[in-house]
Image (tube, helix red, strand yellow):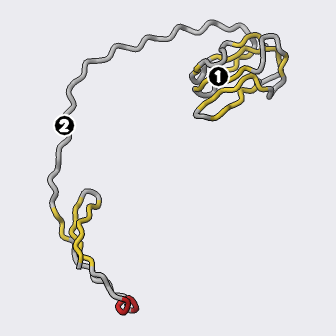
Amino acid sequence: MKKFRITINGNTYEVEVEELGVEAAATPTVKVEAPKVVETPKVEAPKAEAKPAKEAAPQPAPKKAVTGKLTVNAPMPGTILSIKVKPGTQVKKGDCLMILEAMKMENEILAPEDGKVVSIEVSEGTSVNTGDLLAVIE
């Protein structure tokens, strides 16, 4: 017989296990004893000290107003790897405007409609957040 101490859902039990030979394995028998509950001392987590309130983070500068017909915004946070078009370029719906790297994946930012690129509001290597203005198409 071997004794083991097992903890399940915070309760500790002492369990005895008997190793059976090959002959006994042919006719299995299960012997279950009521587990003995072993009380374990509960340790209380240390109380956190009151921390002084942090100052409010500075608010980013407001984005400049865009007068173009259609804006292209970042769908997720990431880094602009490359820009495929320049202002003045005619694009068709689905054309790749730029590559946005997010979570080690390269995502193509596509033109939502046909039109002419009025401006590119980011440069290669720029980190962007969700909703940041990337380009304007008219």
Q: Secondary structure at mark 2?
A: loop
Please report the residue visible at 57 percent of the width from the left and 26 percent of the height from the top. 77
Q: Quadrant of residue 22?
A: bottom left
Binning the other alpha carbons within 10 Å of mark 2 as few (below 14), some (14 to 19) or many (20 upward) gives few
Please report the residue visible at 24 percent of the width from the left and 69 percent of the height from the top. 4
- For the residue pair 86 and 125, the one nearer the viewer reads as 125
In-image side of 39 versus 26 (left or right): left
Q: Mark 1 is on which residue type? A: Ile
Above or below, 50 relative to 63? below
- Give the x, y percent position of residue 81: 66, 24
Q: From this viewpoint, which residue is outermost toward the front?
A: 21
- Give the x, y percent position of residue 2: 24, 76
- Give the x, y percent position of residue 57: 41, 14
Above or below, 14 relative to 24? above
Could you tell me how far apart the alpha carbons at marks 1 and 2 are, in whole angstroms? 45 Å
Above or below, 9 relative to 52? below
In-image side of 39 versus 63 (left or right): left
Q: Secondary structure at mark 1?
A: strand
Q: Quadrant of residue 80?
A: top right
In this rendering, the count of numbered labels is 2
The disc at residue 80 is 1
Q: Quadrant of residue 7?
A: bottom left
Quadrant including the N terminus: bottom left
Q: Mark 2 is on which residue type? A: Pro
Label located before the other in sequence (1 or 2): 2
Please report the residue visible at 29 percent of the width from the left and 18 percent of the height from the top. 53
- Give the x, y percent position of residue 92: 84, 23
The disc at residue 108 is none
**Between marks 1 and 2 in the image, the one whose residue lies nearer the viewer:** 1
Binning the other alpha carbons within 10 Å of mark 1 as few (below 14), some (14 to 19) or many (20 upward) gives many
The residue that disc 2 covers is 46
